[in-house]
Image: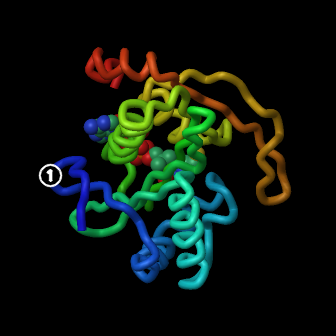
Amino acid sequence: MFALPLRDNAGLEPLEIWHAEEFAGHLERAREHIRPWVGPGFVTDDLDGARATLRRYAERQAADGARLYGIRLDGALVGGVMFTDFSAASGSCEIGCWLEPAAEGHGLVTQACRALLDWAFTCRGLHRAEWHCRSDNDRSSAVAKRLGMTLEGVRRESWPYAGARHDKQIWAILAPEWRAEKQAGFFGE
Ligand SMILES: CC(C)(COP(=O)(O)OP(=O)(O)OC[C@H]1O[C@@H](n2cnc3c(N)ncnc32)[C@H](O)[C@@H]1OP(=O)(O)O)[C@@H](O)C(=O)NCCC(=O)NCCS
């Protein structure tokens, strides 16, 4: 197994089909916390559902598309980050994230997303990375802001959830902006 250290007791690792039981257990702790804020297909209810999510990401990664990574804190799976979309052909990607409640407030997702952005822009030569969130998801838009993203617009009432329609924010950062962020030592953290 290989992992990218985020700090002494935390790291980022690929999340693969063989993690299905562990992922299902983690979702038990995270499900109700993340349900209003992530795509409905990600919030599964049992082991088969968890395995199907991991399989879907594995298949898309095999085609150089979406990718999924787990965040571990003291060895336990507590959340993750992903490329919900990744296109080398168009030079753009979209990043997503989630945490179980106990792992919030430590900067883990911001740090993990920086690793994804750096790989996309530096290793893969992408030009644009997007972040989509419900407009009332303050913790998520705070991450986008910490990453140096710009709020480009709002898709009005484009996020149906629980019988209501919510606005969705589109944030993005471009490759030259990312390089400037890095040079500035992630100024604004
Ligand atoms: C969105 C979500 C992942 C954000 O989690 P988070 O813990 O707020 O984000 P980070 O891991 O970047 O941590 C930032 C927090 O840690 C604090 N922090 C501590 N050390 C830090 C560090 N070294 N760097 C950055 N932040 C740090 C920050 O001050 C901030 O806390 P605050 O909001 O109380 O000020 C989480 O709220 C979540 O899972 N929500 C439900 C699912 C969801 O919304 N997913 C996104 C869909 S678009």
Residue 187 % position (x, y): 32, 18
Q: Which residue is mark 1?
A: 8
- Residue occupying the point 56% across, 21% down: 150
> Image quadrant for the N terminus?
bottom left
> Image quadrant for the C terminus?
top left
Residue 65 % position (x, y): 56, 52
Label 1 Cα crowd, 10 Å radius (few <14 / some 14-19 / many 20+): few
Answer yes or no: is residue 103 visible. yes
Q: Is residue 5 above or below residue 129?
A: below
Which quadrant of the view contains residue 94?
top right
Q: Is residue 55 above or below residue 121?
A: below
**Looking at this rendering, what residue extends furthest in the left direction?**
8
45 on left or right of 97: right
Between 133 and 1, which is closer to the camera in this rendering?
Answer: 1
- Residue occupying the point 39% across, 51% down: 104
Residue 27 % position (x, y): 50, 72
SS label for mark 1: loop
